[in-house]
Amino acid sequence: MPDSLSLGEPAEEAAWRALVEQGLKGAQWARLVGQTADGVAIKPLYRETDIATATDVSGAPGAAPFIRGARQGAWLIRQSFAHPDPERTNAEILADLKGGVGGIELVIDPNGKDGVAIRDAADFDLALSGVILEAAPVSLDAGAEELWAAELLRDKLKGVAAVGTAFNLDPLGVMLRTGRQDAHLEAFAFTAMTCRDLPNARFLRADARVVHEAGGSEAQEIASALYSGIAYLRGLESEALDIEQSANAISFAVAVGPDVLIEAAKLRALRLCWARVLEASGAEAQHRGAYIHAFTSRRMMTRYDAWTNILRVTTAAFAAGVGGADAVTTYPLTDALGLPTPFARRVARNTQHVLLEECRLGQVADPAGGAWFVEKLTRDLAERAWALMQQMEAHAAPLQGFLQGLVRETRAQRQRGIAARREGITGVTDYPLLNAAAPEIERATFISAKAMPTDLSDSRIEPLAPVRWAAPFETLRQRAELHAPRPAVFAATLGALAAFAQRAQFARNLFAAGGVAVLGEEDAYPSRDAMIDAFRFSGARVAVICGTDAAYAEDAENAAQRLKAAGATWVMLAGKPGDSEAKLRATGVDQFVFAGQDALKELETLHAALGVA
């Protein structure tokens, strides 16, 4: 039996490409080649020639260099708990454990603003009351209070087998989030002192989420995680821990977005790079794995039409599973709105149950492995990240602002694409529903009475602040909602419905992204007088002309003049004006809206015309 699975003669890529270019009707081949934020090419076709199979180092699942994952079976469902009231947090933990959650990500903020308001051992005990720590291991996320929280957990673990427990000390991550230097360098001494009593726990976490949530690229995330991981290896070496002990003490936190194959390749590339670091450090092959805790991305979440977040979270969780994450946290659909209700928490955890139990994703080892695109992308990302990590080492990033500058540039580029709606956000920039019902959220009744000081240095660097891609559009929409009555635009349609529908629909979606309604976008008028009468009756003072290019050439100038005469204070035209812009402006058109513009800027102009402040 032949090895080839081909049903016929193998096709030459050159012949295939010639046929494709023929179908492009004069367009360039490059039109089909995309790019990631790191400049990695995404081709429309991959073949075995894209991977040097003779020198492939992927190995088998569960074996060095662990590109294909280290875990056997399902990942750990580890959900996040951040309600400010320790008692309410305890109730949520117990409910989630009963619902099948296997691990606890306890987010601590003594002030109760961004996590559980734990201020002493009594609060800590209350939050974890009734929890069997051997069965439901705790993973900490305490920010600037990480060392203090780690000591609380260490004291609580006395006599308890700590398999799966994670203290998650992350001095560099705290520094990047807060901008303060020298944050808890005692983390290495704590690890050295505690790991002998708790050899199965993990103590340090190289957290790439801070770069991701600030708008960074995949290679920047991997590079920052490697930079932190290497720094932590050096710190533990200074405490006389051997390389195997050090490697076992470190884990990684990674945010995963909705682009399944790119995100899966990101996790695989991180494992490839970390295995290379540990190999160079002298670790034996079996100790070169990277324990990765994947969190669904928060920068992708939306406040409006939050139900669409279920799709985003599901896709991201699927990507994490395909990429071989060891533990996964799925955030509730209301994450951008406020504290989750029991319903939102149940949907979040059951998303993972569906993937594990119904899709059987946990029973497949490295499902993306062997796909030429994924294998090539894994290596391309690893190469970019490795080179970037070396640059970070040379520039003493992030102390000198090198990493922050890269992230700032990447974020701005992505924001420009979103502002122009080249990258759509369902429910916000694409297909927004103006009257969509928002899901319920919890109202926290626990209020901090006193802020707890931290012991961080006053020395400052530029912090990496989190972003949400939808936020600028949501700000415009909220501004419009506070305006009474809701601002609206009249659709001055030209011709039959079939002729103007496309541009009327475009205008409706664009304006709805800014919270502005469109009146009569499906109405066709038998005459110009009928359209003008409808405009007067609508009560609107702003209009958008919608029709075909042919209709514009014949009637747009007259329509604009008559709309202004009927009381319109601002007239727009949906479509590019071309050579007619000067004439159209002279006859009353104030603004042109079309695909590819900076939609945020155009919506701000519209808000000004509508008197929305």
Image (cartoon, grey):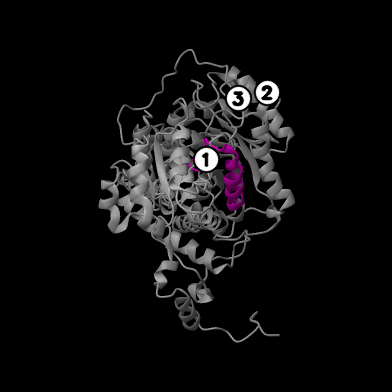
Residue span colored magenta: 298-320
In this view, 249 is above or below 285: above
Three-letter residue code for mark 2: Ser
Residue 75 percent coordinates (x, y):
65, 48
Residue furthest out toward the top:
449
Q: Quadrant of residue 194?
A: top right
Evaluate if marks 3 and 2 touch, with contact meaning CB atoms under 8 Å apart.
no
Residue 184 percent coordinates (x, y):
41, 31
In this view, 25 is above or below 604: below
Prevalent SS, magenta region: helix
Asked whether residue 527 appears in the rendered view, the answer is yes
- Tag 3 residue: 442
Mark 2, secondary structure of its residue: loop
- Tag 1 residue: 301
Mark 3, secondary structure of its residue: loop
Evaluate if marks 1 and 3 touch, with contact meaning CB atoms under 8 Å apart.
no
Q: Quadrant of the N terminus?
A: bottom right
Evaluate if marks 1 and 2 touch, with contact meaning CB atoms under 8 Å apart.
no
